[in-house]
Amino acid sequence: MQPPPASAQAIVCHELTKQFGDFRAVDKITLSVAQGEIFGFLGANGAGKTTAMRMLCGLSYPSAGQATVAGFDVYRQQEKIKQNIGYMSQKFSLYENLTILENIEFFGGIYGLSNQQLRAKSEELITTLGLHKEAKKLVGSLPLGWKQKLAFSVAIIHEPKIVFLDEPTGGVDPVTRRQFWDLIYAAADRGITNFVTTHYMDEAEYCNRVSIMVDGRVEALDSPANLKLQYHADSMDEVFYQLARGAQRGE
Amino acid sequence: MKQLLVFIRKEFYHVFRDRRTLLILFGLPTVQILLFGFALSSEVKDINIAVVDFARDNASQQLISKLQGSTRFRLQRAVLSYPEMETAFRRNTIKAALVFPANFNVDLLHTGHGQLQIIADASDPNTATTITNYLTAIIGDYQQELNQAAGPLPYQIIPETRMLYNPDMNGSLNFIPGVLALVLMIVCTTLTSVAIVREKELGTMEVLLVSPFRPLLVLIAKAVPYLVLSLLDFTLILLLSVFVLDVAVRGSVLLLYLETTVFIIACLSLGLLISNVTSTQQMAMLLSMMGMMLPTLLFTGYMFPLENLPVFLRWAPNVVPAHWYYLIVKAVMLKGLGFGAIWKETLILAGMSVALLGISLRNFNIRLA
């Protein structure tokens, strides 16, 4: 899979840093992600992925450095950023005691979609996922794999420029994970940038480019093929292991 | 605005689909009111009563035989003196006593006025009220019989009632304002804090915070449904009190609703505050139950007389919003007083609401930075 042309940059960070007292959770990371790219954001637990992601989502202010997300500044334009991103967390993020349709209406509604847009979107989404029969069932009654796919579709219901996925496939079987990635590809084809964290190295192979964070710093950043070449490794698993075993920080 | 409505609708879905929440919302006040109402004031039977008869005349004998005829009373004879009567009260062998003064019959025949005394053990105020009502009714009956026989000049027997141990009858109907305070406290504080913390626990809060939906609106969207539901609850309790327990609302209903809204805002703010400092539903539940319900039970004054508090705890009721709300409702609902009588309490309660709301909003904002 070829990376799309790096015409427009969706995310640009320059020496982005987050300091908690003496602890530097994120240490001068510099990277850029192109519009429509699938970018894998890897790192062991405690490497600083979540903190970095929170800064990019407008949930916390950086201590130093610059960053723009969808062209907006993370210090001054957090509200603008929020309108242009979608987010799906590792915890399942739909309401279990709402039906599929009600979840769609709610999340579409808080992003300000009009009733007409909502109707069109729900129809499209339910058709794509093949959930016609379940549309009026409570989300809590669905199998986990379906929930995750639905959560992803809901996270991009407002057609954001970028979607942040924080370990979206945790606890899901390989077949469903593969189907989940089909959704990610489809979103990328529509020009949505996917910023994904994962612990599954097979998923890292699906990304256009990946970065690997160790102890708050980005230690490697390239396409999976180039990284394997560079580290003389057969798989991303090996690349990751070579980098991560040097980590000083535990969980 | 539309976003807010979407959010509020979602909150109502949550409430109406959660059986536990519904149970707390509507089951709890109903059960509380009925339990307090009927367990405490139901029919009283087999009342042990002593007669202290200083008169030993015709009239007193006739009244005593009427008492004996009543199925409600079990007459304890042969108590002749006050000290003996008091001992009997203290040993709890009698619940009430009827005292005839020395010249009962003579006074009644000559002046047309006869006086006697009803003494009741008011440590259980509901029972005491019921007993004196029964006795007064029996005496009224007897008086009527006399009058029918006597013709134009009416006889009048005036019972003087004395409530032992609890002269002000604290707690008779006071449980209604108390239950109101308790139920609103539970509904607003517990349910609001749990509703917010649940989103944190499930991870949906993160999604909300990443969305352009403003954090302040999240709070409003959470608070509005519970404000509405609390007012519904308040209405339910009022209706139960009026139609099931026959307790009339003496004061202005509008004033009651306004005061209740002020109290609800205090409770909601407490709920928000709790949700700020906890991250699991259980913790929120525990904090609001232990931290809010116990003080409400102990310090409002409807379950335990505040006069009995140990000295070092005397200040405590003053910082409990429910205490002030209880005083206000008691004054308006049971005594029929207007705003003029409760403006001080209202001011204190409103001050607490504003302060709590301010603190909780401030904390919420800090957490998001």
Image (cartoon, rainbow, N blue to C red):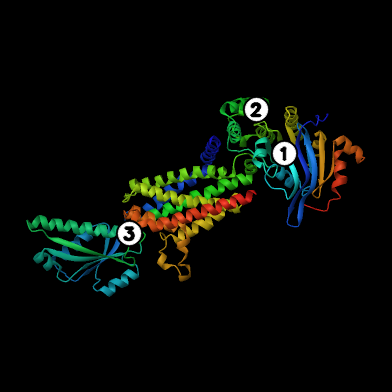
Depicted B69 relative to depicted B311: above or below = above
* Label 3 CA crowd tier, 10 Å (few <14, some 14–19, many 20+): many
Whether B67 is drawn above or below A234: the answer is below
Identified at 28% across, 73% down, the residue is B84
Residue B116 x/y as whole percent:
20, 66
Residue B237 shows up from this direction: yes
Q: Position of residue B59 (x, y in %)?
A: 14, 64
Q: Nearer the viewer, residue A10 or A111?
A: A10
Seen as rendered, the residue at the extreme left is B152
Please name the amino acid that badge 1 sits on.
Val
- Which image quarter: residue A12? top right
Same subunit under labels 3 and 1?
no
Residue for point 87% across, 42% down: A239
Of the two numbered discs 1 and 2 in the rendering, the one whose residue sits closer to the viewer: 1
Tell me the subunit letter for badge 2.
Answer: A
Q: Nearer the viewer, residue B237 or B336?
A: B336
First in sequence, mark 1 or 2: give its number: 1
**Chain letter for the residue marked with disc 1 in the picture:** A
Numbered badge on residue A7: none
Above or below B81: residue B240: above
Tell me the crowding category of disc 1: few under 14, some 14 to 19, or many 20 or more residues within 10 angstroms, Cα based: many
The x, y position of residue A153, in whole percent, is 67, 32
Q: Which one is in front in this view, the residue at disc 2 or the one at disc 3?
A: 2
Q: Which residue is mark 3?
A: B127
Inter-mark Cα distance, 1 to 2: 26 Å
Classify mark 2: helix, strand or loop: helix
Answer with the quarter of the image where residue B131 lies. bottom left
B94 relative position to A231: left or right: left
